[in-house]
Image: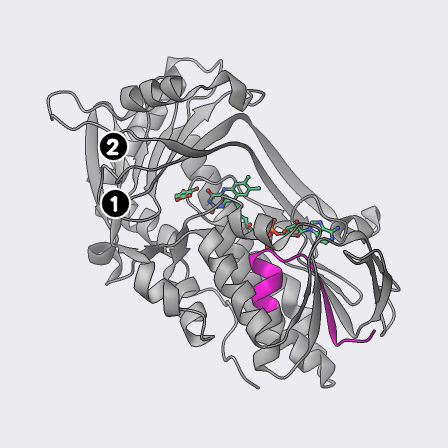
């Protein structure tokens, strides 16, 4: 087999890259260890920045997004028994975010690749990347029918997430890693119940952080801060709802969280990680393969999309003899990556209960939260970061 770009991973980064390359007339082969059904059902992120929505629209991927996506003009910050609205539209001159689940983005992308005859191989095993410093890197995998394939490529995109094989293929002395762990995790549930709020609620509470998000007018997505080593088994549905009621309680308001059947339950560890550079020879890393942020602030999916929006034109230029954009790829992406890394760390630090921390820590968090809702400058900073960074490059024209 031969292709121009071998892509490891059919998450949002790999699938979107494959589509953006196809728009430029560049063919690719995507390989994925999981099944199509698994990729389409994996519950993860839910918030798209302004720029991500625009990119999906311009790339012809927004038919369902425009019908089903829920545009939000702000969020609520809740702390010390008060709920405050941060109005993104008013603070940023009209910028918004759109609630549209990663599962739906992935479904849209797979449908588009399949409809246009794109090569996406699910259920592969033993993926290998080789000859990365040559002009003809090689991608090997064993397909679902047991056949071993070797694909000669002009470039390989490592879009295989944090636990993939591509970052590992970079000699350790050539990769600088910056990393921070957090002493807590998120327990996330999907619930078959209409949301109890019109916009997301980020709640600071002495018991720990809680987030009320949503997926549709009839399905809610909720998160609780839990211990880093807790298992889902320790959280029967009743315990989850009791804890959510407690952390979202607004004394005297009459507001109450609506409860319903739990459709999905999972625990997400929290980590900040940046590997640089995001390139080794003809291997280019994108999305979680290169960097991870804690989910507070909803940046992971948006970063993955922003990376490949830069990578597609860079690969196009490389394949046509201009190496400059590919040489700039890592530095260009890392400016946005570090901004989101800082914002996610800041949101995480401000909103979570730090195990073992004293009252001083909690007072500092509360002071910061009060400042964010009282100062227009501070609220604008949160709103600008949350909705995205138009001033940072994220790829431009879709065609050459
Ligand atoms: P992924 O979506 O991880 O896709 C990588 C793909 O590569 C996977 O399909 C994987 O199966 C495949 N793969 C791995 N190894 C191989 C191999 N050797 N060969 C072939 N294929 C391989 N972000 C938010 O903004 N909000 C959230 O609430 C949120 N929740 C999350 C919950 C979890 C459990 C996780 C893991 C992440 C969450 N994120 C969240 C982050 C967000 O979902 C990711 O940033 C986003 O999925 C990144 O997309 P990606 O394409 O880079 O990687
Ligand atoms: C969602 C996840 C997040 O991490 C976040 O900050 C907001 C929303 C969600 O899954 O809907």
**Mark 1 close to ligand 2, CB under 8 Å:** no
Q: Is residue 12 above or below residue 255?
A: below
Q: Give how far apart the Cα atoms at labels 1 and 2 are.
A: 19 Å
Q: In this picture, which residue range is highlighted in magenta?
A: 1-17
Q: Residue at x 33, y 27 (%)?
A: 204
For the C terminus, the quadrant is bottom right
Apparent side of residue 39 relative to residue 86 in the rendered image (left or right) = right
Residue for badge 2: 370
Residue at x 82% of width, y 52% of height = 169
Q: Judge by depth and name the residue closer to the eye, 86 or 21.
A: 21
**Of helix, strand and loop, which one carries label 1?**
loop
Judging depth in this view, the residue of 7 and 348 nearest the camera is 7
| Pair 1/2: label in front | 1
* Pointer 1 local density, CA inside 10 Å: few below 14, some 14–19, many at least 20: some
Give yes or no for residue 49 being in the magenta stretch: no
Q: In this rendering, is residue 62 above or below 171? A: below
Residue at 47%, 75% in the rendered image: 59
- Which type of secondary structure does the marked residue at label 2 adopt? helix
Residue 256 horizontal/vertical position (percent): 19, 27
Question: Which mark is drawn over residue 199?
Answer: 1
Q: Earlier in the sequence, mark 1 or mark 2?
A: 1
The answer to which quarter of the image holds residue 79 is top left
Q: Position of residue 192 (x, y in %)?
A: 33, 37
Quadrant where the image shows the N terminus: bottom right
Q: Is residue 389 left or right of residue 166?
A: left
Q: Is residue 34 left or right of residue 3?
A: left
Residue that lies at the very extreme toward the front in this rendered image: 145
Name the residue located 49 percent from the left edge and 76 percent from the top edge: 396
Q: In the rendering, at what x and y percent does residue 75 appear? A: 27, 44
């Amino acid at each position: 087999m031969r292709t121009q770009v071998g892509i490891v991973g059919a998450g949002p980064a790999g699938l979107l890259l494959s589509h953006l390359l196809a728009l430029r007339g560049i063919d690719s082969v995507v390989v994925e260890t999981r099944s199509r059904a698994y990729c389409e059902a994996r519950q993860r992120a839910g918030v798209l920045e302004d720029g991500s929505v625009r990119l999906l629209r311009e790339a012809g991927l927004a038919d369902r997004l425009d019908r089903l996506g829920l545009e939000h003009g702000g969020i609520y910050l809740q702390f010390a028994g008060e709920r405050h609205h941060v109005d993104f539209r008013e603070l940023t001159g009209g910028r918004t975010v759109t609630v549209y689940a990663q599962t739906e983005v992935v479904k849209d992308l797979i449908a588009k690749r399949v409809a246009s005859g794109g090569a996406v191989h699910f259920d592969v095993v033993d993926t290998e990347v080789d000859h990365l410093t040559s002009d003809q890197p090689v991608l090997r995998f064993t397909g679902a029918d047991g056949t071993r394939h070797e694909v000669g490529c002009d470039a390989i995109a490592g879009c295989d997430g944090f636990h993939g094989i591509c970052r590992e293929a970079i000699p350790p002395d050539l990769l600088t890693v910056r990393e921070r762990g957090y002493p807590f995790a998120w327990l996330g549930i999907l619930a078959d119940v209409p949301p109890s709020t019109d916009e997301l609620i980020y709640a600071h509470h002495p018991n720990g952080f809680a987030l009320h998000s949503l997926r549709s007018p009839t399905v809610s997505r909720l998160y609780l801060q839990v211990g880093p080593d807790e298992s889902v088994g320790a959280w029967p549905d009743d315990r989850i709802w009791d804890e959510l009621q407690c952390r979202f309680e607004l004394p005297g308001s009459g507001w109450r969280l609506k409860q319903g059947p739990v459709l999905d339950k999972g625990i997400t560890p929290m980590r900040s990680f940046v590997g640089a550079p995001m390139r080794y020879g003809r291997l280019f890393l994108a999305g979680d393969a290169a960097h991870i942020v804690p989910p507070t602030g909803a940046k992971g999916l948006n970063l993955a999309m922003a990376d490949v929006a830069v990578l597609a034109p860079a690969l196009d230029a490389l394949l046509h003899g201009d190496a400059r954009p590919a040489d700039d790829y890592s530095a260009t992406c890392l400016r946005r990556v570090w901004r989101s890394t800082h914002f996610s760390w800041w949101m995480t630090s401000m909103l979570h209960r730090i195990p073992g921390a004293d009252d001083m820590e909690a007072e500092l968090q509360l002071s910061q939260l009060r400042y964010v809702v009282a100062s227009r400058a501070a609220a604008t900073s949160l709103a600008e970061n949350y909705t995205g960074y138009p001033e940072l490059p994220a790829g431009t024209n879709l065609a050459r």
